[in-house]
Image (tube, helix red, strand yellow):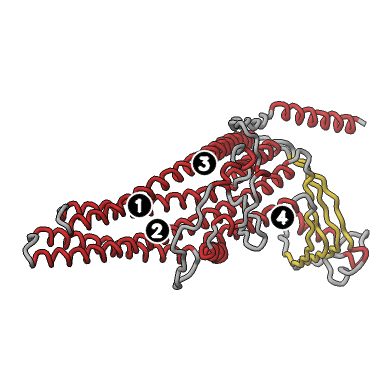
Amino acid sequence: MKRNVYTYIGSAYCILWMVTMGCKTPQVAQIPQLKEIPSHETQTTTQDIPDLTLKQFFKDDYLIQLLKKAQKNNPDIHILQQNVWIASTVLQQSRKAFFPILSIDALTSGTKYGKYTMEGVGNFDTNLSDNIEEDQKIKTNPTPNHWLGLKTSWEIDLWGRLKQLKESAQMQYFSTKEGLRLMQNEILGQVADLYFDLIALDNKEKILQRNVTLQNEILNIIKIQREVGKVTELPVKQFQASVVNSEAHLEEVRAEKIRTERALLSLIGEYEGDILFDTTFKNISHEWLTHLRHLEDLIHKRPDVQQAYYQLQASHADAKAARSAMFPRLELGGYWGLNSFSAATFINPASMAWQLLGNITMPVFQQKQLASQFAIRNYEQQIAFYKYQQAVTRSYNELQSIIGQARQYEKILALKQQESLYLDSAIHISNDLYTTGFANYLELLTSQKNKLDADLLLVDYQLQQAKLYVLLFKALGGLMLRDEEDKLS
């Protein structure tokens, strides 16, 4: 009777101690609220954005083909795909932790016990007992042991530790998938950037080639004028130097084209091949940017923001799991099978053996270590939140910057195109004035240089506008691409 009382008192004390320890255990920090994203006058949502296919977005078949090749062959994308599969496997493992572990064990052994050991003396004494039958006598030199059966163990998730570890694995899986989307967008953006670089370099090559041809024609006229005594050797040398400078610039552009083509081949995962491209920037237009007013929905669906969000949720689950690790752990287990020290009696109903086991483990001296691990998880959660806030803030400002720059570039390009037309007229006028003697060679040289500089600068602005469009594609994270045949995510 006293023994039962002591048992009850001990159990009550253990429960009281567990509850007390639970009350003293530090709490998981709450996830702070994000700063509110500024609202605008028009409450347009992402549903108002027209569904665009990849082809409608970029409007260039050559570029679409390159993007497909990059998505199919780029090693960085394949590496992250492997990471997604790894994260999926970890998630599957975390789900299986809720189920009992069951194994089939087969064991056979022979042991020679010493004469002065508990086992050795016990076996010898057992064989002398009158209470055992002949087939129960133990062979002592050596003593055999045969076992075949099932063993199981099962951790009962009392405090939700396994649940939180599964939640963390799930969030990490989602984060890895968003990381893949982010890498896809980054690689595809790099392909598009290099593609537009190639178009710009091709246009510059043509401009420089036309300029060299024009300069040579004028140089021939000046040489004729020198022969008849109308001009001196000075304008001849000046124009020769200008021609050589243009030719050097032309070769520099051709060298840059080679570098750009090779960089594109690397991104699409090929050694050799011709990079086909259009000769103009295809209909780069931002008329639908008027739909992007209320940006909150867009921002929270971007892959970088989604990745940061899932990392935050994973760190929160890790902190909860670390807290649960400070509580007692309950495990159930047991075995069932055949166990005998004799091969002759092994397959015998009397050799059946089984055991049920319940085990409660409460960390005592490890509490400080577990508390430190919990504190680290809490700090990591705060870091994850700041990264999440940083991703949201950066995304908002990127989109606002793109919207503002897009309109400015449309104005700049309109003005630069007018400038190019005016300078084109200036060249014709200066040529006529020079041949009639009303302008000198310096005025002719200056008008040509101004025209060349304006044409090259116009190509640069067209390139910047195209790259702004690529930046918009990356900033939206491919959200607007809904074509089932051509989608890349």
Q: What residue does disc 1 label? A: 421
Q: Secondary structure at mark 3?
A: helix
Give the residue type that dot 4 points to.
Answer: Gln
Q: What residue does disc 2 label? A: 200
Closest to the camera, between mark 1 and mark 3, is: 1
Closest to the camera, between mark 3 and mark 4, is: 3
Asked if residue 368 lies left or right of residue 125, the reply is: left
Report which quarter residue 489 is drawn in: bottom right
Q: Position of residue 153 (x, y in %)?
A: 79, 52
Asked if residue 77 lies left or right of residue 101, the reply is: left
**10 Å neighbourhood of mark 4: few (<14), some, or many (≥20)?**
some
User: Residue drawn at (44%, 73%), measured in percent from left and top?
Assistant: 272
Closest to the camera, between mark 1 and mark 4, is: 1
User: Residue drawn at (79%, 31%), measured in percent from left and top?
Assistant: 14
* Mark 1–mark 4 distance (CA, rounded to whole Å): 65 Å
* Mark 3–mark 4 distance (CA, rounded to whole Å): 43 Å
